[in-house]
Amino acid sequence: MKKTNFQHLGTAFDDFFQKKGFVKKMQELAIKEAWHEIVGPVFSKSTQNIHINNSHIYITISSPAIRNELILNRNQIKKRINEKINAQVITHITIK
């Protein structure tokens, strides 16, 4: 009799997405969608671009005053991002 290895469907999907690199893209999308909730409407409105490369997030802000405020609170922002996506993905934040 042939021996087969059974795997839960959810686990199979997770493995597939991980191998194809979709997990990082899905996390990036989740961060971008939750940005307004993470930093609030005033800071979100001044955000021009969010880009993630490996575990580093690059954020472009249009207002110098808001940029400075975000720089001062970057550790708290990093913590909120990682909590939002339920993973320790972001280790560095660069705010320009």
Image (cartoon, rainbow, N blue to C red):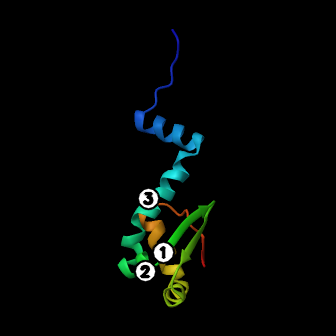
- In this figure, what is the number of numbered marks? 3
> Which of label 3 and label 2 is nearer to you?
2
Q: Is residue 42 left or right of residue 58?
A: left
Q: Mark 2 points at which residue?
A: 43
Is the Cβ of the residue at disc 2 closer than 8 Å to that at disc 1?
yes
Tell which of 57 and 87 is nearer to you. Answer: 57
Q: In which quarter of the image is residue 85?
A: bottom left
Q: Which amino acid lies under the numbered mark 2 shown in the image of this protein?
A: Phe
Relative to 89, say whether 14 is above or below: above
SS assignment at label 3: helix
Q: Mark 1 points at which residue?
A: 47
Q: Can residue 26 be spotted in the picture? A: yes
Residue 30: mark: 3
* Place of residue 29 in the rendered image (x, y in percent of width and height, measured from the top left): 47, 57
| Sequence-wise first label, 3 or 2 | 3
Q: In which quarter of the image is residue 10?
A: top left
